[in-house]
Amino acid sequence: MTPVQFTFSSAFVLGLLGLTLHRYHLLSALLCLEGMMLSLFIALSISTLQSDSTNASASPMLLLAFSACEASAGLALLVATARTHGTDRLQSFNLLQC
């Protein structure tokens, strides 16, 4: 494993650990998801550039588009839950109550 691959793999794992261990606020969970998506985007972009393949050149842009959609949906959920519950703490949410 090259140092570049190790760096982006460790960035993804750190985002995953942050998502699993620090689940206190919804905003921190969304930031961890964005960090994971950013590390995936950069790793996919570098691998596409190193392979010199024109067939896979659209993959990083597709991932970036899905990441933008995920971020906008996450922020919409954050605003909606802050308005209805008054907080973004994940422990105050009840999944059984609609």
Image (cartoon, rainbow, N blue to C red):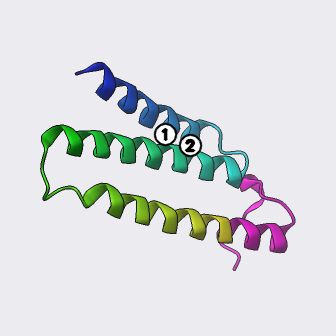
Q: Is residue 91 above or below residue 81?
A: above
- Please, what secondary structure does the residue beneath circle 2 have? helix
Image location of residue 30, percent across then percent down: 61, 53
Q: Residues within 10 Å of mark 1 (few under 14, many from 20)?
A: some
- Please, what secondary structure does the residue beneath circle 1 have? helix
Residue at 22%, 42% (x, y): give it.
49
Tag of residue 57: none
The residue carrying mark 2 is: 19
Task: Look at label 1 and name its amino acid.
Answer: Leu
Marks 1,2: beta carbons within 8 A: yes
Relative to 24, is 34 on the left or the right? left
Image location of residue 3, percent across then percent down: 31, 19
Q: Is residue 56 above or below residue 14?
A: below
Residue at 53%, 50% (x, y): give it.
34
Q: Quadrant of the C terminus?
A: bottom right
- Which span is picked out in magenta? 77-98
Relative to 92, is 17 on the left or the right? left
The CA distance from mark 1 to mark 2 is: 5 Å
Q: Which quadrant holds residue 43? A: top left
Residue at 42%, 65% (x, y): give it.
66
Residue at 46%, 46% (x, y): give it.
38
Relative to 43, is 57 on the left or the right? left
Q: Is residue 97 magenta?
A: yes
Task: Look at label 2 and name its amino acid.
Answer: Leu
Q: Is residue 38 magenta?
A: no
Residue nearest the observer in this picture, 66 or 54: 54
The residue carrying mark 1 is: 16
